[in-house]
Image (cartoon, rainbow, N blue to C red):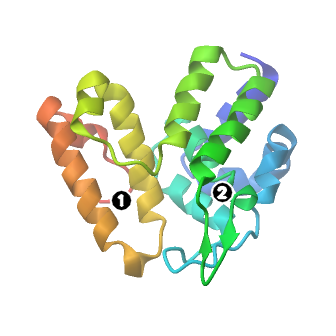
Amino acid sequence: MHNRQYELKKILLQEDIVESINNNLDIILSIIPEVGDMIDFPHNHPQHHLDVWNHTLYALSLSKPDFDLRLCLLLHDIGKPHSYQDEEIRHFRGHPLKSSIISNDILHRLKYNDSYIKEMCYLIENHDNPINRKQIINNYELSLKRYLIQYCDALAHNPDRLEKRIMYLKRTLDLLSEYKKDTEEKVKTKVK
């Protein structure tokens, strides 16, 4: 494991992830300077009550200490400051793809192997796309990882606008549970 990978892993696997990131933000920014673009970047959208960086931290706070999950959550919206459209309200069309492209560059720079980068970028690029039965049948574990990212991301949105997201999460959890009975145990996070 390369030194930068080790530093990142050490920070992201702490129990209090937000405190760990805040206490080591200078290290995070030296490893992934692109993170700086998210800090104080406003969403200006009713689905969000936090800026991009604080939304990311909130999503991370809901995750269990799993490096892949937390790395994806750290990077899932990194493309938002580079893919927004200011209309009546701000939109971020194309941000999952932009986040995936930026993440691909970051992960290559950090010398992760190609198969790992491909999986992480797939998860980031598809973090907003609904999970369907065919995807679960084809790769349950990958679908479960996507679900965990979506779960933490969804609950970090505006609490007054969560109803549809929670309904989606419930339906998807039921679908995942059809294939593995212990799914609900696997998806437990800090949120009940």
Q: Badge 2, how many Cα within 10 Å: few under 14, some, many 20+? A: some
Q: Which residue, given by chain and number where applicable, does mark 1 sit on?
A: 191
Q: Badge 1, how many Cα within 10 Å: few under 14, some, many 20+? A: few
Residue 7 in view in this figure: no
Q: Which mark is residue 19?
A: 2
* Residue 42 in the image: above or below residue 14: below
Nearest the viewer among 153 and 138 is 138
Nearest the viewer among 64 and 98 is 98
Q: Residue at x 67, y 58 (%)?
A: 80
Amino acid beneath label 1: Val
Residue 126 in view in this figure: yes
Counting from the top left corner in percent of width and height, residue 161 is at 39, 77
Report the Cα–Cα distance between label 2 and label 1: 18 Å
Q: Which mark is residue 39?
A: none
- Whether tag 2 and tag 1 are in contact, CB under 8 A, the answer is no
Quadrant where the image shows the N terminus = top right
Counting from the top left corner in percent of width and height, residue 168 is at 27, 58
The part of the image, by quadrant, that contains residue 147 is top left
The part of the image, by quadrant, that contains residue 88 is bottom right
Counting from the top left corner in percent of width and height, residue 156 is at 48, 65
Q: Nearer the viewer, mark 2 or mark 1?
A: 1
Amino acid beneath label 2: Glu
Counting from the top left corner in percent of width and height, residue 27 is at 83, 43
Quadrant where the image shows the C terminus = bottom left
Counting residues from the start of the chain, the first of labels 2 and 1 encountered is: 2
Which residue in the rendered view is the most extreme toward the bottom? Answer: 88
Kindly state the secondary structure of the residue where label 2 is placed: helix
In the image, 151: left or right of 158? Answer: left
Kindly state the secondary structure of the residue where label 1 is placed: loop
Q: Residue at x 84, y 46 (%)?
A: 33
